[in-house]
Image: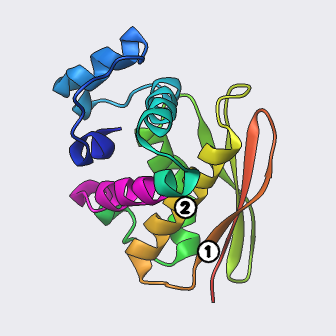
Amino acid sequence: MIAALDLLDLQSTEGLPEPVRALVADASHRSHKIPEVHNLCFFSWLRDERFDSDEGYLTFTDAVFRRFYAMPVYRVAFLMGRPVQVAASSGRIWGFIRKGTRLEVARRADQQLWLRVTYPPHLIDALHGRVLARGLAIAYRTAHGLGDLAVTVEGQSAVKLQLRVHWS
């Protein structure tokens, strides 16, 4: 949400629930993680209010992730090593910024790994599953310059998102 707000010129927050509207209005929240439900509420509202298509919204969220991962603290966190090493610490990094969800490495193989994101029932829809996959790909590519790295959604349920990270 922080990086998105930096890229937006919000004239109105009409339609946002009060707890989320308060977060948008109060810059002091920027030093604290916010509940994922509030973050996704904001982004779902933003998709509905500002974008005519999912593709336009995905392009915007890509820019949000690029800006976010350019912040010094996260840039350093992702410069630790190869994608497998970064993925091994991704759960901790995820926990620093996402409250109410969990990321873990489910399995590793040569030049690929599988991640599992767990969350409360129905918190993450298919669109935001794609957003998360693209965001992780941007993080790993930014850290390592691996243009051929991809993160794909391998499956999703009401409480779990399964992602595959692969590179050559």
- The reply, left or right, for residue 124 in relation to residue 156 is left
The residue identified by callout 1 is 150
Image: magenta residue range: 59-74
| Residue depicted at 67% across the width and 32% down the height | 119
Number of disc labels: 2
> Residue 49 lies in magenta, yes or no?
no
Q: Name the quarter where the N terminus is drawn.
A: top left
Q: Nearer the viewer, residue 105 or 3?
A: 3
Outermost top residue: 18
Marked residue nearer the N-terminal end (1 or 2): 2
**Residue type (three-letter) at the residue carrying disc 2:** Arg
Task: Give residue 118's position: percent from left, percent from top.
Answer: 69, 38
In this rendering, the answer to whether 106 lies above or below 165 is above
How busy is the neighbourhood of tag 1: few (under 14 within 10 Å), some, or many (20 plus)?
some
Outermost front residue: 52
Q: Name the quarter where the C terminus is drawn.
A: bottom right
| Residue depicted at 81% across the width and 39% down the height | 157
Task: Give residue 32's position: percent from left, percent from top.
Answer: 30, 29
- The reply, left or right, for residue 73 in relation to residue 116 is left
In this rendering, the answer to whether 116 lies above or below 96 is below
Question: Mark 2 falls on what kind of element?
Answer: helix
Task: Give residue 155's position: percent from left, percent from top.
Answer: 81, 53
**Residue type (three-letter) at the residue carrying disc 1:** Ala
- Rendered image: mark on residue 134: 2
